[in-house]
Image (spheres, rainbow, N blue to C red):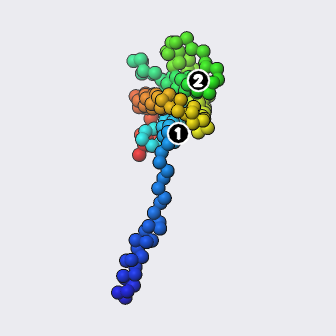
C-alpha cells in the first residue's frame, strides 16, 4: 500500500506537467492592434463593444438626446462610421469621403429612418478595419500602427458616450454590461 502511495505521489507531478497548456505565442503588433479593434467592435472584454452599445434600440431611441448638447447614440454611430471609413480609405489608398472640415456634420448627418442601416454600416466598417489589419503587409502595418491605435481609442471613447446616453434615457440594461 505504501508503494502505491509513493508511486502516486511521484507520478502526480509528471501527469500535471503533461496537462500543462503550451505557452501562447508572444503578442505581435498585429495581434495587439487587432485585439484593440475587436474590443471596441464586438468582443466584450474590459468594456462594452460598439455592437452591444447600438443593439436593441428603436430608431426613436437611437435619435434621443438629453437636450444639453450630448449627441444621440445614432449621431455617435454616424460619427464613428465616417471617421473609421475615412481612415480606412486613407490606409488602403481608396478615395476619401468628402469633408468640409466641420466635424459636427459627421454627427448631424444621422437620419433615424436609416437606423437599421446605420447599425449595419458601423459593424461593416469595424469588420473592414479588422480585415485590413489581418491582411495588410508588415510595412503597411508599421506605417499605420499609431493611426490604428488611435482609431481604437477614439472608438472606445464614443462607445462609452453611447452607453452614457442610453443610461440617461433609460434604454440600457446593465445585464448587457461587462461581467
Task: Give above or below for 108 relative to 38.
Answer: above
Instruction: Tell me, yes or no, if residue 122 can be seen here.
Output: yes
- Image location (x, y in percent) of residue 74: 52, 25
Callout 2 crowding tier (Cα within 10 Å): few <14, some 14–19, many ≥20 = some
Please give the name of the residue rendered at 53% of the width and 15% of the height, measured from the top-left corner. Answer: 105
Q: Residue at x 40, y 71 (%)?
A: 13
In the depicted structure, whether residue 31 falls above or below residue 66: below
Residue 134 occupies quadrant: top right
Residue on which the image places disc 2: 90
For label 2, the SS is helix
Number of numbered discs on residues: 2
Pick the residue in front: 97 or 107: 97
| Relative depth, front residue between 106 and 145 | 145
**Front-most of residues 69 and 80:** 80
Q: Residue furthest right?
A: 94
Task: Assess whether mark 2 and mark 1 are in contact (beta carbons under 8 angstroms).
Answer: no
Q: Which numbered tag is attached to residue 30? A: 1
Residue 65, how many percent across, how many down?
45, 22
Q: Earlier in the sequence, mark 1 or mark 2?
A: 1
Q: x%, y% of residue 159?
A: 46, 31
> Which secondary structure, mark 1?
helix
Look at 48% across and 58% down and name the residue there.
22
Q: Which mark is residue 127?
A: none
At which x and y percent is residue 111?
A: 57, 20
Q: Quadrant location of the N terminus? A: bottom left
In this view, 70 is above or below 4: above
Quarter where residue 15 is shown: bottom left
Mark 1 vs mark 2, CA separation in Å? 18 Å
Q: Residue furthest left?
A: 2
Say which residue appears at 37% left-offset and 77% top-offset.
9
- Kindly tell me whether residue 116 is visible in this rendering: no
Amino acid at each position: 500500500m505504501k508503494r502505491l502511495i509513493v508511486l502516486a505521489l511521484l507520478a502526480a507531478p509528471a501527469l500535471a506537467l503533461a496537462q500543462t497548456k503550451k505557452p501562447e505565442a508572444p503578442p505581435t503588433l498585429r495581434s495587439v492592434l487587432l485585439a484593440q479593434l475587436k474590443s471596441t467592435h464586438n468582443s466584450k472584454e474590459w468594456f462594452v463593444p460598439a455592437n452591444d452599445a447600438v443593439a436593441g434600440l428603436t430608431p426613436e431611441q437611437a435619435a434621443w438626446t438629453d437636450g444639453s448638447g450630448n449627441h444621440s447614440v445614432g449621431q455617435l454611430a454616424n460619427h464613428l462610421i465616417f471617421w473609421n471609413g475615412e481612415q480606412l480609405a486613407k490606409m488602403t489608398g481608396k478615395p476619401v469621403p468628402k469633408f468640409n472640415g466641420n466635424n459636427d456634420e459627421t454627427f448631424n448627418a444621422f437620419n433615424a429612418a436609416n437606423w437599421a442601416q446605420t447599425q449595419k454600416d458601423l459593424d461593416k466598417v469595424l469588420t473592414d478595419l479588422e480585415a485590413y489589419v489581418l491582411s495588410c503587409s508588415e510595412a503597411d502595418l508599421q506605417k499605420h500602427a499609431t493611426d490604428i491605435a488611435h482609431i481604437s481609442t477614439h472608438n472606445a471613447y464614443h462607445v462609452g458616450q453611447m452607453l452614457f446616453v442610453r443610461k440617461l434615457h433609460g434604454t440600457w440594461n446593465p445585464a448587457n454590461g461587462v461581467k
